[in-house]
Image: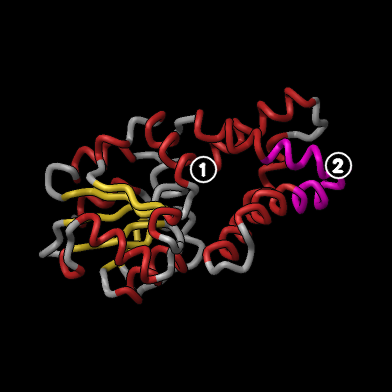
Amino acid sequence: MKHLKHIFFDLDHTLWDFEKNSALAFERIFEENKVAVEVADFMTVYNPINQDYWKLYQVNRVSHQELRYGRLKDTFDVLGYSIKDELINQFSDDFIAYLPLNNHLIEGTIDTLNYLRDKYTLHIITNGFAHVQETKMTNSNLVSYFKTITNSEMAGNKKPHASIFDFALNLAQANKNESVMIGDSWEADVMGALDYGIQAIYFNPERSVMHKSVVEISKLIELKSIL
């Protein structure tokens, strides 16, 4: 890590607290539509389903629209809650509208970024939808920390595809040997970066599966002792 100049962060689940902010968005949707489902129960089912759909989306096995519809339909089906497709589509639109209005960050985000920005140039690489990600970062006061923000729409491909890393490094005017990727997805962030030829740090707060082949952290603040 000695020669590092550029740090590339994932956004959702790494800096921006997707689970907490999602729960708040669904709480508003359920209240407005009088949905008789506890948000906590919904999120327990929804979170792993959403992650599975994103893994499929990353490798182009489902479309943007299939992701947005399927993750809700599958969750309500598991919960045994009958709901019409028209309402699912409305909830999907409402979720995209409400989600970025919340601004909870992963513990240690601001402290860590304040430390790192004095030593490195910081960047974002995200598979999220452009307008949603931009609103998230603006509302949570993250924009000023990052020199460049690359999303999959502007790059034309999603992590782990090499072209999004290539796009991001060209935008950042960064060399591979000066760069590291930090993210919570083993497939998209870590393997994507390593296959492209840059270093990676795996953010694994749950410590569910340990990977000794790369540097791994469970709290963002640990970066202060590594970088």
User: What x and y, as percent, mark residue 115?
Assistant: 19, 41
**212 horizontally vs 121: left or right:** right
Q: How far from the left and from the top, in percent, is residue 139? A: 41, 29
Label 1: element kind: helix
Q: Magenta region: which residues?
A: 73-92
Residue displayed at 67% across by 29% down: 27
Of badges 1 and 2, the one in the foreground is 2
Q: Looking at numbered disc 1 in the image, what kind of residue is underneath it? A: Phe
The residue that label 2 is drawn on is 84
Residue in view at x 82 percent, y 31 percent: 36
- Residue 184: x and y in percent read 43, 57
Amino acid type of the residue tagged 2 in the rendering:
Lys
Image quarter where the C terminus lies is bottom left
Q: Is residue 21 above or below residue 212?
A: above
C-alpha gap between disc 1 and disc 2: 26 Å
In the displayed structure, 70 sits above or below 211; it is above
Q: Name which quarter of the figure residue 2 lies in.
A: bottom left
Dot 2 alpha-carbon crowd within 10 angstroms: few under 14, some 14 to 19, many 20 or more: few
Quadrant in which the N terminus is drawn: bottom left
Q: Residue at x 33, y 40 (%)?
A: 109
In this rendered view, identify the residue nearer to me: 50 or 196: 196
Q: Which residue is mark 1?
A: 18
> Along the line of sight, which residue is nearer the eye, 8 or 119?
8
Residue 175 forms part of the magenta stretch: no
